[in-house]
Amino acid sequence: MDLITQLLVAAISSGTPLLFATLGGILIERSGVMQLGAEGLMLMGAVIACTTYIHTGSLGWTLLAVLVVGGALGLLHSFLTVTLRANQVVSGLAMTLFGSGLSAYLGKSITGTPIPGSVPKIDLNFLDGIPIIGDMFAHLDILTWFSLILVILAHLFIHRTSWGLHLRAIGDNPATADVMGIPVQIFRYGYIIIGSMLIGLAGADLLLVYSPTWIEGMTAGRGWIAVALIIFARWNPLRALFCAYFFGAMDTIGFKIQLIGSAIPSYFLKMIPYIITILVLMYLGWRNRNKPSGSPEALGAPYIREQRF
Amino acid sequence: MKRVKRSWSLSLVLAFLMVAVLSACGSNNNNESASESPSPSESAPASSAAASESPSASASGNGIANPRVAFVYIGPPGDGGWTYQHDQGRLYMEKELGIKSDTVENVPEGADAERIMSDLAQNHDIIFATSFGYMDWTLNVAKKFPNVKFEHAGGYKTNDNMATYFGKNWEASYLSGIAAGKTTKNNTLGYIAAFPIPELVYNINAFTLGAQSVNPDIKVNVVWSNTWFDPTAERNAAISLLDKGADVLLAYQDSPAALQAAAEKGKMAGGNDSDMTRYAPEAYLTNPVWNWGPYYVKKVKALMDGTWTNDQYLGSFQDGMVDIAPVGVNVPADAKTLIEETRTKFVNGELNVFTGPIVDQSGTEKVAAGQSLTDAEILEMNWFVKGVEGTIPN
């Protein structure tokens, strides 16, 4: 495999957890609620996946448990932000701190125990001979395929269905949506819960596919990168795919450059993803300077019927 | 107006939470140190430590019957590596001496470390600071609290009340190198290194020399991860090395991610700090391990007897502070024999890893034939031996 192919393969494998988390975040933020709890939710997803898999040995139960716990945390987040109208920044940060602490506590007894199996792969042997495509897609696991399908579904849902229109309406202008008869609070509850499930699944994917042992703090900041990717992708699932894979590739490009024998100090190589983020944001900001930012207009503001802001 | 009110109530809630947390911490400390005066006016630092101990214990030689011991950790005890081994040592010490100790986990190597150690110094007699980056912060606190003893792992700065401890783990790295050199099929090894500091440089060199001792054509590719603990980054580094063609890896990191990555690709790897066999028995090579327990017993015992000194301790195979994990099942049998023999030489003090002739990457002779580097020279090493492919960033 040449360098480009290696990078593309790495992009998919380390970008998939980021993709799940970004998609979940997009659904939540499109409904007008900020999502800063990804780090905590991913850690909870990972620890629940590891515990359930070790104790039941069944991948099905594992994924179900992750979805249930992710959904429960989403319910908590929506109760705080939608019903109690708590500050969404504080609530999100609380979710991160709560998830980091609770996952460390729950994980104490299983730390260092390898999981009893792995996620099944779909072997597309007819792709094997094809360069690049074959290396990238011939032997992906089912969670990675699921994330790819999810991107397409999320894109069609948001932009091509009336439900998606409602979602965008409650994120951009909840008062108008309310007048039109869309139950803003109930919809926000639903999207926060579904989005949190996906972010939990991101943590489970990291554990089941990428680093198959629970270790405290194993996301090491990837939840925060997912938060940045939501903005980077401008709340669009298709762009999220490219952004997540791009960051996945950037995760590994520093090591590749070191191994080529370049004289660039490794500290500088470690900054590459962040420097490129800043450059791309500058470029997009300049190119789209006369267009709307893509951010849901009511993002961050709790909706209270008949109150003016 | 309503928004203003809400943010007020929010800050009230936060303030309340903070008070609750702080009071919980406070009461915890009081339980730990029953001798502490309850009077709130007595705010002089180290008052409680001074109360239970005669002034300048190091000079008078008076012991402390029930020393209050604290450990400062860089990570969680569940990291499976560095902090795990320190915590095992701590538990061993508790069991041997029948005392209890306190720990603070996840302390960053920065100003927070100084603040946390200052807090601990007010009601503890001895503090173990278990990471290199705590060095200057520990020294600052040691100067402020002359009656409290400080033990710093891996550093080189001391004070009247501050000792250092570490071990010659390069000897164990040399043995891991022998295992890797016997196991590799294409003479290409990979090394995932945390930070470009002397500790890594001499371990990489010792690993390379060990591998070359059984197989002179060995090349060791080095990548810097610039992290002690980030399983995803460690895995990416491992895959990059495997893609480059390395078939045996060593990861001087705190997580087993590199070993797991190698196992998936049917290659072999070792980790660091503790026995990592359980993560991937088939793919496990071996690696240096730490065994801190006996040292912790010795120093706390010395404090109890009043014989504590501020020496710079360097453990080895001889006292068991440094050891090598059981060699993996797929390492050739002759490697195991050779490792045992070489280990015996280290125990008897018959072998120095850095005995000449040794040349660096550019071919310049660094150690002449028949000469050996001293421990002090090894501890500040900043050049790679020939056969290492990689650079040390400045």
Image (tube, rainbow, N blue to C red):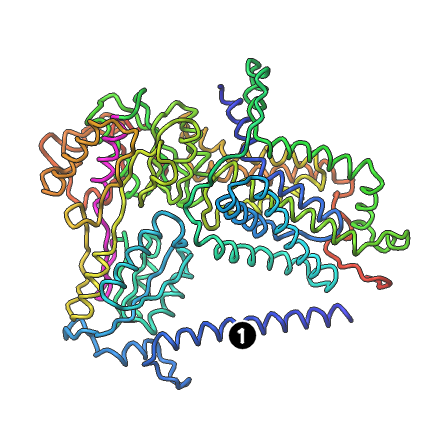
Residue at (59%, 47%) from the top-left corner? Answer: A66
**Span of residues in magenta:** B156-182
- Measured from the top left, where is residue B337 in percent x and y? 17, 31
Q: Is residue A248 above or below residue B142?
A: above
Q: Chain of mark 1?
A: B
Residue A143, image x, y percentages? 60, 34
Residue at image x 48%, y 44%? Answer: A54
Percent across and percent down for residue A240 are 66, 37
Q: Please state which of residues B13 and A128 is positioned toward the viewer in this rendering.
A: A128
Amino acid type assigned to the residue bearing label 1 in the image: Val
Q: Where the C terminus of chain B falls, by quadrant?
A: top left
Examine the structure image and report whether residue B180 is included in the region drawn in magenta: yes
Which residue is at a point 21% across and 57% down the rendered structure image? B295
Residue B76 in view of the camera: yes
Q: In the image, is residue B20 above or below residue B382?
A: below
Residue at 65%, 49% (x, y): give it: A196
Magenta segment includes B206: no
User: Of all residues shown, which one is farthest toward the right?
Assistant: A180
- Side (left or right) of B183 relative to A299: left
Work out which quarter of the rendered image holds the N terminus of chain B and state it.
bottom right
Secondary structure beneath dot 1 equals helix
Closer to us: B137 or B13? B13
Quadrant housing residue B158: bottom left
Can the viewer see residue B391?
A: no
Residue marked by disc 1? B19
In the drawing, does residue A33 fall left or right of residue B108? right
Disc tally is: 1
Against A275, residue B42 (above or below) is below
